[in-house]
Amino acid sequence: MHAKPPAMVPTPTHHRTSHRKRPPERIKRRVAVAAIRRLGLECDSNDPRKRLMSLARAIAAGEKAAEITKPGGLLDAVIDAAGNGEGFAGRATAAEAAAWGLAWAARSKRSSVTSGAAFQRIEGIASALLPAVEAGDTTPAGFLLVLGRLFADVEACDRFAPLAVAAVEAEIEQLMPSGGAIGRTGSEAILETVARWAGVHLRAEETGDVPWSPRVRDALLSAIETAMRLLPADRRRGKPAARGGWTMSQGWESIVDVARRHGVKPAASHSAGGFAVMRSGRGRGSMRILVDARGASMHLEVVVESRLLCCGEWSFQASADGAAVEPTGPWADSCFETETAAKADGASETTFAEWTLPLSRGLRLERQLVFAPRDRVLLVADAIVPSEDSARAGSADSPRLAMEIEYQSGLPVCPGIEFEAAEETRELIGFDESVRLMALPLALPEWSSSSCDGRLEAEPGRLVHARRSRVARTYAPIWLDLDASRIGEPLTWRRLTVADSRQNLPEHRGCGYRIQVGGSQWLVYRGLDAVRNRTVLGCNLACEFLLGRVGRSGTVERLIEIQ
């Protein structure tokens, strides 16, 4: 168990206060055992893990300190594992366990063993890792902090804790300059970084005072809040597997510990500065979506029931009248709304997110993601429209709108996920050991025998969706059904008629689609010109986007509506 965090809030200069001359407190047996066991679980290979666990068992069983620390004993075996460890992480983990074991042996006897060979070897490993920490690699920082704190009365350890704290503070300030999203791409990189910070924070609480300034502490808690949204629901030990399995790494548990101590309870959906996370809950059947649009490209992740289905760049290509259309600026947040409806079986949330990208030739890409976790569906869609509002609201006969648009997007697919096309229709079924998802190209005819200007095909590592339009307005939606139990039931989808003032509209002004899988039906509407009062499937609309659930009586329950 970790010690209870101190109630005091450190002052801006608190972390510079020297405690190195204060003799360390006596290390209790249970504290040393708990620390060594935790470090053993963090080992990536079996041999060092066995050595650390053997050391923890011996201390817990009451074996004498002299027996454990004798030459060639259990402590030397752990130090050998540290010397032969793979990378900074492996060496630091085993060396920290040895430091805890040696500190317990020394304090339990109330005598010093810091002049012995074991301490000299541990101190030598720390000295070898110190240049990496000074250069900005904070992987061994937790070990250096612990060694410096446990042997604060030893002059050779004076430098370790201050340099470790300074390195972690510099990394936090660099990656979170204003307390915003963490400067890493992808869930795994973010979680590993934040887990490292949280681990140093917990070690500081275990061994003395928390060293952060208020600004760094706030940035750390903000990072913990983001990381909590990304943690997998499955708490079994492990890391993302080669085939996409996604389970809780033991090292990531430090994130949960810090969040629990400081009362960090993040909302399920959040977006800021081009970084958005949406999830359905914390159970094993939960789903999580991540979108990172902070760079030149957009990164997308989709996790369903601890299985990583999509991970990588969500790409696109486009041309106008045969000439390539290129981005002329960065992605920008356009809209992020979550609508909650009270249900008999609990609250239901639907989230709409949109990002825009300016393009050459006076065009703009509007990328939408709509997540309805209760229905277990995800709509991903791109719309290419004129960038000027006046042109967007103009008629189809406007010369500025008359251009032939060729569009293609690539939705990333994780290794191990394969897709199979239906024999007579255009849906694709994604599977590995079992069926995982189904993709429907809503804007294309259901039957593959029907001609159309578009396609949805599976290529290695991605789903390719292509469309052609003769007007500078086009919409390309993909409906992802993430409920494996529903796949295989009768299904159909249709493009609906959209009416405005009793006139049927062409597709480049307003699109409507009805999707039916088994006994479930949905309605999707997207306006591509001015927002006006319109009718689709008997439903009156005055909005730009609508996702609704169609009841058995034909009435439409509006899950989310964007004006």
Image (cartoon, rainbow, N blue to C red):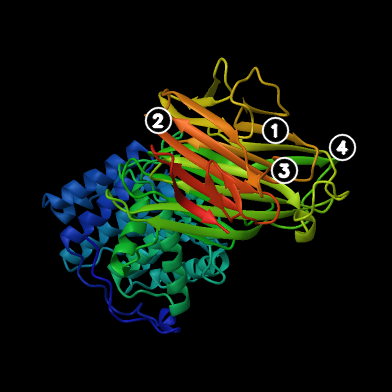
Q: Give the residue pinned by disc 1.
A: 466
Graded by Cα atoms within 10 Å as few (under 14), some (14 to 19) or many (20 or more), the crowding at tag 1 reads many
Q: Give the residue pinned by disc 2.
A: 484
Q: Which mark is residue 230?
A: none
Q: For this rendering, which residue is in front, 152 or 30?
A: 30
Question: In the image, what residue type sits under mark 4?
Answer: Gly
In primary-sequence order, the first of circles 1 and 2 is 1
Camera sees residue 186: no
Q: For this rendering, which residue is in front, 295 or 39?
A: 295
**Between marks 1 and 2, how big is the CA–CA gap?**
26 Å
Question: In the image, what residue type sits under mark 3?
Answer: His
**Between marks 1 and 4, how big is the CA–CA gap?**
15 Å
Quadrant of residue 246 in the image? top left
Task: Tell me whether the residue at label 2 lies in contact with that at label 4, contact meaning CB atoms closer than 8 angstroms.
Answer: no
Residue that appears at 38% across and 37% down = 552
**Between marks 2 and 4, how big is the CA–CA gap?**
40 Å
- Residue 336 at what x, y percent from top left? 54, 59
Please tell me whether mark 1 sits on a helix, a strand or a loop: strand
Q: Quadrant of the C terminus?
A: bottom right
In primary-sequence order, the first of circles 3 and 2 is 2
Residue that appears at 52% across and 47% down = 539
Q: Give the residue pinned by disc 4.
A: 322
Q: Give the residue pinned by disc 3.
A: 508
